[in-house]
Amino acid sequence: MPRKIPTWLIEDNETFRDVLVDGLRVTNEFIPTSFGSCEEAFEALAQGAEPPEVILLDIKLPGISGIRAIPQLKQKAPESKIIILTINEDDLNIKRAMVEGADGYVVKTAGLKELFNAMRSALDGQRH
């Protein structure tokens, strides 16, 4: 039986978020909790939620952007691995996110297999 990996998805696009949560559930490995904003995730942590092992974080969010949230997430959940979700692979924001402490990135058009590989690589201590 695969180990269960608590995973948070912070994504404002509800349709994409729901599809990704369904894809994560299919694995029986990643146990997703989703948020529409960084503020919602910070509130969950403030109320005592256990930090996840993996955070899938959209770069462009209303309110606190994914990039601006990385240092705060690393402070509040230092063991969590952060994978940035982005639309454009050549985005300068990816470099900024990696400098801020992201553990990897995946373009939103990638398949679930690529996403899962990036998540597993981050959990193994590799930057992807």
Image (cartoon, rainbow, N blue to C red):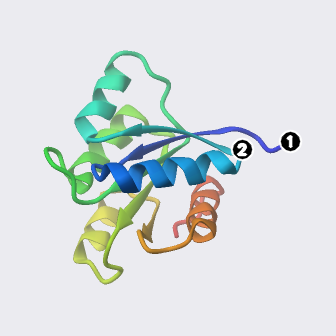
> For the view shown, which residue lies furthest in the left direction?
63
- Residue type for callout 1: Met
Spatial distance from mark 2 to mark 1, Cα to Cα?
9 Å
Crowd class of label 1 (few under 14; some 14 to 19; many from 20; radius 10 Å):
few
Seen in the picture, residue 95 relative to 60 is either above or below; the reply is below
- Residue type for callout 2: Asn
- Who's the residue at 36% across and 24% down the image? 44
Question: For the residues carrying marks 2 and 1, which lies nearer the camera in this image?
Answer: 2
Q: Secondary structure at mark 1?
A: loop
- Could one spot residue 125 in this view of the protein? yes
- Who's the residue at 64% across and 58% down the image? 120
Residue 36 found in image quarter: top left
- Who's the residue at 27% across and 40% down the image? 38
- Who's the residue at 29% across and 25% down the image? 43
Crowd class of label 2 (few under 14; some 14 to 19; many from 20; radius 10 Å):
few
> For the view shown, which residue lies furthest in the top direction?
47
53 left or right, relative to 124: left
First in sequence: mark 2 or mark 1?
1
> For the view shown, which residue lies furthest in the right direction?
1
* Residue highlighted by disc 1: 1
Q: Secondary structure at mark 2?
A: loop
| Residue 48 placement (x, y as % from top left) | 41, 16
| Residue 37 placement (x, y as % from top left) | 26, 41
| Residue 60 placement (x, y as % from top left) | 22, 59
- Could one spot residue 57 in this view of the protein? no
| Residue 124 placement (x, y as % from top left) | 66, 57
* Residue highlighted by disc 2: 28
